Image (tube, rainbow, N blue to C red):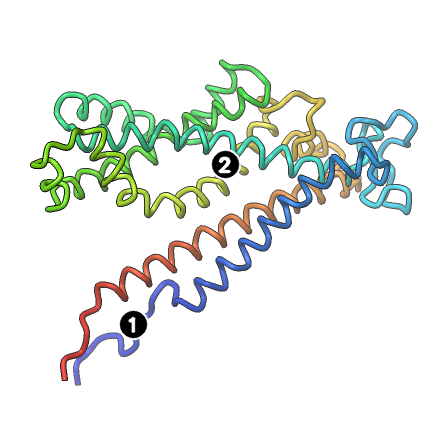
Amino acid sequence: MALGVPFPLKPFGPGLAARLARWGLVIVVAYALVALATPLLIQAGLVADANGGLENPIYGPPSLAHWCGTDRLGRDVCARTLAGSGVALEVVALALGLALLIGVPLGMVSGYLGGGLDRLLVLLMDTLYTLPVLLLSVVLAFLLGKGLPNAAAALCVVYVPQYFRVVRNQTAQVKADLFVEAARSLGAGPIWILRRYLLRNVVTTVPVLLSLNAADAVLVLGGLGFLGLGLPESIPEWGSDLQQALGAVPTGIWWTALYPGLAMFGLVLGLSFLGEGLEGWLSGASGRLEKPSKQT
């Protein structure tokens, strides 16, 4: 009897990966629906204005009038938490969209052409990649100033090296395949080969990285807001609300920190479930494709 593990464990089976992806998708879609519905509910008067509160008591506990209580300025905590979901999704989507538009083409060009351009881009991206994510985003946010586009730009620079590295390595492997050599021998130019043959073969792992980076970006954005470097105070944001609630928590005022924290936790959990589920599903699919068929 051979020694070893009798039943080797896999990180995620296809069933578990599908359930994780399904639950993550449900959570993310729920946040997206809340983000779309909140401005309409505010205009209809069904939800209080996220920045209005002069007529409300400060640090009011949860009640029928204010389900989640009020903060130090009398603003409705529930309204600010709901509005913060739209702000978080908007900033993260803009940041990762820009990172994709920059990182993927640079990675493809670098991996396909090689040479001095490849070495220069790899050196630059490796330098950015070695810096801590939060530290780099804090420095960029401090230099750019507060604002939604500035926060998205600060997050974008952080994640460009990750997409560059993944796509560049995939391109360097795929460009040696026979179909690329055949296209090159038939006179196809680099732009045509990159767009027609390489793009769809090197972006297969990007959705997984995108969802995992989105979860990380929500936390980084919250960290910037907590440090006072994210968005202006007039824009509801979970990190800044948590920073303002920090001094009131020891006095028993728990509601100003609980609901923004739960909202951030839920969105990060949903995006993490979605990313891990996609990774497990893709790993299982690739394993099934590579598994040889039984010979009778």
For disc 1, the neighbor class at 10 Å (few under 14, some 14 to 19, many from 20) is few
For disc 2, the neighbor class at 10 Å (few under 14, some 14 to 19, many from 20) is many
Residue 27 at x, y = what percent? 59, 52
Residue 127 at x, y = what percent? 29, 25
Identity of the residue drawn at 65% across and 39% down: 85
- Name the residue beneath numbered marker 2: 217
Amino acid beneath label 1: Pro
The picture quadrant where one finds residue 197 is: top left
Identity of the residue drawn at 86% across and 31% down: 58
Which residue is nearer to you in this view: 20 or 269? 20
The picture quadrant where one finds residue 290 is: bottom left
Identity of the residue drawn at 33% across and 63% down: 284
SS type, badge 1: loop
- Can you say which quadrant of the picture contains the C terminus? bottom left
| Disc sitting over residue 8 in the figure | 1
The picture quadrant where one finds residue 185 is: top left
Q: Residue furthest left?
A: 185
Residue 107 at x, y = what percent? 27, 32
SS type, badge 2: helix
- Can you say which quadrant of the picture contains the N terminus? bottom left
Identity of the residue drawn at 77% across and 41% down: 78
Left or right relative to 95: residue 126: left
Which residue is nearer to you in this view: 66 or 166? 166
Amino acid beneath label 2: Ala
Using the numbered discs, state the Cα–Cα distance from disc 1 to disc 2 in whole angstroms.
34 Å
